[in-house]
Image (cartoon, rainbow, N blue to C red):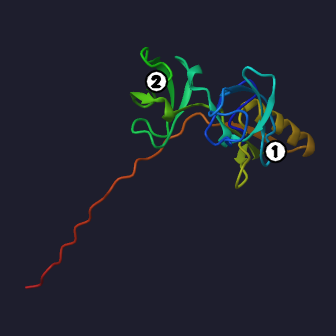
Amino acid sequence: MAKFKVGDRVRFTDQCHRGWWFGPHTEIKEGEVRFVEDDAVSLKYRVVCDDSDALVFVDDQHIEPEQGLLKRGDKVCISLDSKYLPGEIARIRDVDPDDPEETYFCEGTDRWWIAAKHVTPYIDASIVCLLEDGEPRPSVKPFVHASEESATKEAERLSLMHIGQEFGVFVLTEKRVAEAYEETVTKHRSVAA
């Protein structure tokens, strides 16, 4: 599943080789995704670099969302290592006016100011399932599409290949992570008198 889509603004990460002419160690630190090859084993993105018309081939680890583009109302995912709202899908309700690219006020099951390093843009995760008697029968490891539109196209393709069979599109709308807790068990030995 591609983490980015065509048109996304991205920033190059420190995973870019120091010998490359683009990346955080150079003048060319950002770009725009122009092509995504979902089926590629590696180098699935083509990014046009800012201040250049050059097209570079990169992978997930080489790019990250350009955080400065997040704004009020954006749907975001909170990382699991965040102290507040870990693993939740939330909405940005406010941006820190003193540091707009570093801190966001997010609302999920609760409301907290969260550091930008824990916030990434939400991607509509969708899967396609075979429907039998109206009930979904997902595969053991379904392919996760980056958008509902992509999953819908795949469902249409599958229905044309398998005439008479029905396929449904399912979109992730909410997710929850249970917090770990520690339970102390005290054993008592009974003594017979």
Q: Position of residue 107 (x, y in %)?
A: 45, 26
| Residue located at (72% from left, 31% from top) | 148
Q: Position of residue 37 (x, y in %)?
A: 81, 38
Q: Residues within 10 Å of mark 1 (few under 14, many from 20)?
A: few
Q: Quadrant of residue 18?
A: top right
Q: Residues within 10 Å of mark 2 (few under 14, many from 20)?
A: many
Q: Answer yes or no: is residue 9 visible.
A: no
**Residue reaching furthest to the bottom:** 193
Q: Quadrant of residue 70?
A: top right
Q: Quadrant of residue 19?
A: top right
Q: Amino acid at mark 2?
A: Tyr
Residue 175 sits above or below residue 70 on the image: below
- Frontmost residue, 86 versus 67: 67
| Residue located at (73% from left, 30% from top) | 5
Q: Which mark is residue 172?
A: none
Q: Amino acid at mark 1?
A: Asp
The residues bearing labels 2 and 1 have C-alpha atoms spaced at a distance of 34 Å
Quarter of the image for the N terminus: give it. Answer: top right
Residue 72 sits above or below residue 8 on the image: above
Quarter of the image for the C terminus: give it. Answer: bottom left
As helix, strand or loop, the secondary structure at mark 2 comes to strand
| Residue marked by disc 2 | 104
Q: Position of residue 105 (x, y in %)?
A: 43, 23
As helix, strand or loop, the secondary structure at mark 1 comes to loop
Total marks placed: 2
| Residue marked by disc 1 | 39
- Frontmost residue, 112 versus 156: 112
